[in-house]
Amino acid sequence: MRVKVCGITRLEDALLAEELGAYALGFVLAPGSKRRILPEAARRISEALGPFVVRVGVFRDQPPGEVLRLMERARLQVAQLHGEEPPEWALAVGRFFPVIKAFALEGPAKAAWADYPAWALLLDGKLPGSGKPYPREWAQPLLKTGKRVILAGGITPENLGEVLALRPYALDLASGVEAAPGVKDPEKLRALFARLRGL
Ligand SMILES: O=C(O)c1ccccc1N[C@@H]1O[C@H](COP(=O)(O)O)[C@@H](O)[C@H]1O
């Protein structure tokens, strides 16, 4: 299973996640986040990683020009739009970087979201990065469309089985493997990848 570890702010966390087998690492460049990282700090981490781990920038309601500037400054590879961005913004960013579009669930996902112009769609709870899960069956209408769907929102090493059962394209975790916002817990990271190998 592809796993993105999000909310990276420290080099040691990034290197451990890479070593354990993370497919992608997320750097939150959205204002107001308790996991926000400056683009220069994200760049230093990005440049220390090997070539086979995807560097994702996470944005919320930032116009395409700002997203593209930050992506370049931080040397990231995929843009995750986590707000109410109109499709035109994703198209503008998508001319330069693959886009992941996140949707906040307050009820069942809408199959029509599959038409949003993005490489993959991400389903999160109402409050991004809050660690609060939603009823997992809410993901089904979008999963059934055949679009690449990434599941996020309150995933932990303990509840991994219930999200894996839905057979998403990938999983995305922030708080479930943290000791504090922006600080990963090495034991939780190890538990996550050990469980993934065992399931
Ligand atoms: O983590 C944040 O602070 C954040 C801020 C703004 C947009 C997205 C954010 N995080 C995303 O939230 C989910 C993970 O949430 P959880 O903590 O595992 O419940 C993931 O998609 C992050 O990219």
Image (cartoon, rainbow, N blue to C red):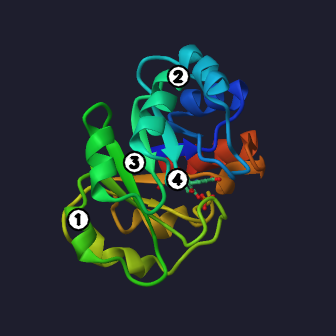
Distance (Cα) linking label 3 and label 1: 21 Å
The reply to whether callout 3 and callout 1 are in contact (CB within 8 Å) is no
**Residue closer to the observer: 199 or 44:** 44
Expressed as whole percent of the image width and height from the top left, the position of residue 33 reads: 68, 51
Q: Is mark 4 within 8 Å of ligand 1?
A: yes
Where disc 2 sits, the SS reads helix
Disc 1 residue type? Ala
Task: Give the left or right position of residue 91, taking residue 34 as reference.
Answer: left
Residue 176 appears in the rendering: yes
Disc 4 residue type (three-letter): Arg
> On the image, numbered disc 3 is attached to which residue?
1
Q: Which residue is denoted by mark 2 in the rendering?
A: 73
Q: Which amino acid does label 2 sit on?
A: Arg
Gap between marks 4 and 3 measured at Cα: 26 Å
Give how far across and how far down residue 59 sits, in percent.
Answer: 51, 47
Residue 12 is left or right of residue 95, and the answer is: right
For residue 120, above or below residue 23: below
Residue 14, by quadrant, is: top right
Q: Rounded to the nearest whole Å, what is the CA distance between mark 3 and mark 2?
A: 30 Å
Q: Distance between the residues labelled 1 and 4?
A: 20 Å
Q: How far is the residue under mark 1 from the one under mark 2? A: 30 Å
Frontmost residue, 129 versus 81: 81
Q: How many marks?
A: 4
Q: Mark 4 points at which residue?
A: 60
